[in-house]
């Protein structure tokens, strides 16, 4: 069983990690893939700012910090996991990663950290639900 868990550091994504650990518990074939996606919005950069190596390094550093708690939870639970860090459009990368790793399910929080994304269900969660071709579990 391959579970993709997008992690953004929010309380909802922490709950999603715990739920994925529960789903994977007792399954020898289970692997959790922790995914963090950064982009200009998450880094607080303007769209007119040219993408450069400093931006990529900042994204990698923020991803590492964001994934740390989720990684610790997987280690403590004794569940096999891997991490992926990406830069770009969040929803598109979640869908692409799910396809690339042949995920059986996506487990994600309903609300991210962004003010605009926290309206109603959240635009990323909504986009993933509409585009995914595998089951998506949304966790509050």
Image: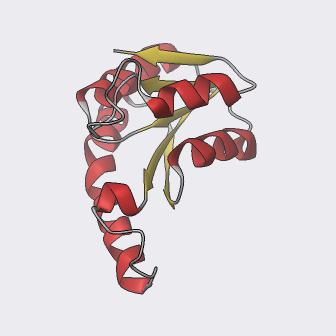
The quarter holding residue 12 reads top left
Task: Please tell me which residue lies in front, 38 or 15.
Answer: 38
In percent of width and height, residue 85 lies at 47, 57
Q: Residue at x 53, y 24 (%)?
A: 126
Q: Is residue 3 above or below residue 68?
A: above
Q: Residue at x 35, y 83 (%)?
A: 54
Whether residue 104 can be seen here:
no
Quadrant in which the N terminus appears: top right
Task: Please tell me which residue lies in front, 49 or 131.
Answer: 49
Quadrant in which the C terminus appears: top left
- Left or right: 136 with respect to 72? right
Task: Please tell me which residue lies in front, 92 or 64.
Answer: 92
In percent of width and height, residue 55 lies at 37, 76
Q: How many marks?
A: 0
Q: What is the residue that sits farthest to the front in this orientation? A: 48
The colour scheme is: secondary structure
Task: Please tell me which residue lies in front, 77 or 13.
Answer: 13
The quarter holding residue 77 reads top left
In percent of width and height, residue 81 lies at 49, 41
- Left or right: 81 with respect to 129? left
The quarter holding residue 44 reads bottom left
Q: Residue at x 34, y 69 (%)?
A: 46
Q: Residue at x 34, y 27 (%)?
A: 111
In percent of width and height, residue 78 lies at 40, 31
Whether residue 59 can be seen here:
yes
């Amino acid at each position: 069983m391959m579970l993709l868990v997008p992690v953004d550091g929010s309380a909802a994504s922490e709950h999603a990690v715990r739920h994925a650990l529960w789903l994977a518990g007792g399954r020898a074939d289970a692997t959790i893939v922790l995914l963090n996606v950064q982009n200009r919005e998450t880094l607080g950069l303007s769209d007119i700012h040219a993408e450069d190596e400093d931006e990529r390094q900042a994204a990698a550093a923020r991803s590492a910090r964001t994934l740390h708690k989720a990684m610790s939870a997987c280690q403590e639970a004794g569940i096999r996991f891997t991490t992926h860090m990406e830069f770009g459009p969040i929803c598109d990368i979640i869908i692409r990663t799910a396809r690339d790793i042949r995920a059986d399910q996506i487990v994600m929080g309903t609300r991210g950290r962004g003010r605009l994304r926290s309206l109603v269900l959240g635009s990323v969660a909504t986009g993933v639900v509409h585009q995914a071709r595998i089951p998506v579990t949304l966790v509050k």
